[in-house]
Image: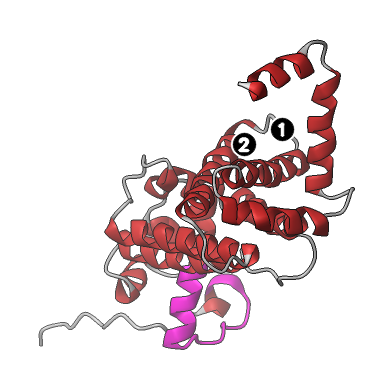
């Protein structure tokens, strides 16, 4: 009689025989799939995707290689699903109640963003820098969705009836700057995290102020933004830093000459 290869099933191993412990509870199909995604996401967060293999995922999950292939057709599929989950988590970190000064809200958002960058560094760094062999239309779509969510959340915080093209461009440019800056920080750690968090928010306030100089409608709104800010918040600290420039010998006269045209 011909022998038959048993099908791949998700059943408990004989743990007592191998380890002396009681057998583990059998995982359902959904539970096993979620476990594999969680394990893969942890590995991809700590190492670039090209350095993680199916065997690594199987070993970390306490599963066999065929079992991983039973749930996913290959590493790219599990990477894209893991990235999708991570992207959903990151997009959610941009959500913040529309209460209190704008810069303080953004400061809290940037704190959560940098927490995420810090804990998911290598995988996201490889993808965002365009150097990952695992990059694909699927992974690019995930990153684009995160950027879109961030863009929409920032516009909600600005609460402008009709954001002009300059405002929209400023928000997109700031999101791109936050990505580049945070990834550089991830590799160098040359600036304390709290300082980077503050700088990113202050750069947005500065960029928004420059945009207001070119868009009269935004200039009218800017007075309300500044009126709501507190002296100890990111905007208040920025104003004091800029005011300090007025003490630089010759700077006031030079600026005055340029302003006079």
Residue 225 point in image, percent of width and height: 74, 57
91 displayed left or right of 137: right
Q: Which residues are magenta?
A: 18-39
Judged from the image, the secondary structure of the residue bearing numbered disc 1 is loop
Q: On screen, 8 above or below 252? A: below
Determine contact: label 1, label 2, CB under 8 Å.
yes
Q: Is residue 29 magenta?
A: yes
Q: Is residue 26 magenta?
A: yes
Please name the residue that numbered disc 2 is placed on: 185
Front residue of 107 and 131? 107
Which corner quadrant holds the C terminus?
top right
As drawn, which residue projects farthest toward the front? 260
Residue 255 point in image, percent of width and height: 70, 20
7 displayed left or right of 92: left
Identity of the residue drawn at 76% across and 15% down = 253
Judged from the image, the secondary structure of the residue bearing numbered disc 2 is helix
Which circle marks residue 191 in the picture? 1
Front residue of 1 and 84? 84
Q: Quadrant of residue 65?
A: bottom left
Q: On screen, 109 above or below 24? A: above
Q: On screen, 259 above or below 180? A: above
Q: Quadrant of residue 141?
A: bottom left
217 displayed left or right of 98: left
């Amino acid at each position: 009689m011909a022998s038959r290869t048993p099908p791949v099933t998700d059943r408990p191993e004989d743990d007592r025989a191998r380890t002396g412990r009681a057998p583990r509870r059998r995982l359902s199909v959904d539970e096993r799939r979620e476990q594999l995604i969680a394990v893969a996401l942890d590995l991809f967060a700590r190492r670039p995707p090209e350095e993680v293999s199916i065997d690594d995922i199987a070993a970390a999950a306490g599963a066999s290689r065929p079992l991983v292939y039973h749930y996913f057709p290959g590493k790219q599929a599990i990477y894209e699903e893991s990235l999708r989950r991570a992207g959903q988590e990151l997009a959610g970190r941009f959500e913040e109640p529309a209460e209190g000064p704008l810069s303080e809200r953004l400061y809290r958002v940037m704190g959560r963003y940098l927490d995420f960058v810090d804990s998911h560094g290598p995988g996201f760094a490889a993808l965002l820098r365009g150097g990952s062999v695992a990059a694909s239309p699927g992974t690019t779509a995930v990153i684009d969705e995160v950027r879109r969510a961030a863009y929409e959340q920032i516009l909600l915080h600005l609460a402008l009836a009709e954001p002009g093209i300059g405002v929209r461009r400023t928000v997109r440019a700031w999101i791109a700057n936050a990505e580049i800056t945070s990834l550089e920080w991830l590799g160098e750690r040359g600036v304390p995290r709290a300082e980077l968090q503050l700088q990113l928010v202050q750069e947005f306030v500065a960029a928004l102020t420059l945009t207001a100089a070119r868009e009269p409608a935004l200039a009218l709104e800017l007075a309300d933004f500044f009126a709501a800010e507190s002296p100890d918040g990111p905007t208040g600290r920025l104003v004091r830093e800029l005011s300090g420039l007025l003490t630089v010998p010759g700077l006031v006269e030079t600026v005055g000459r340029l302003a006079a045209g």
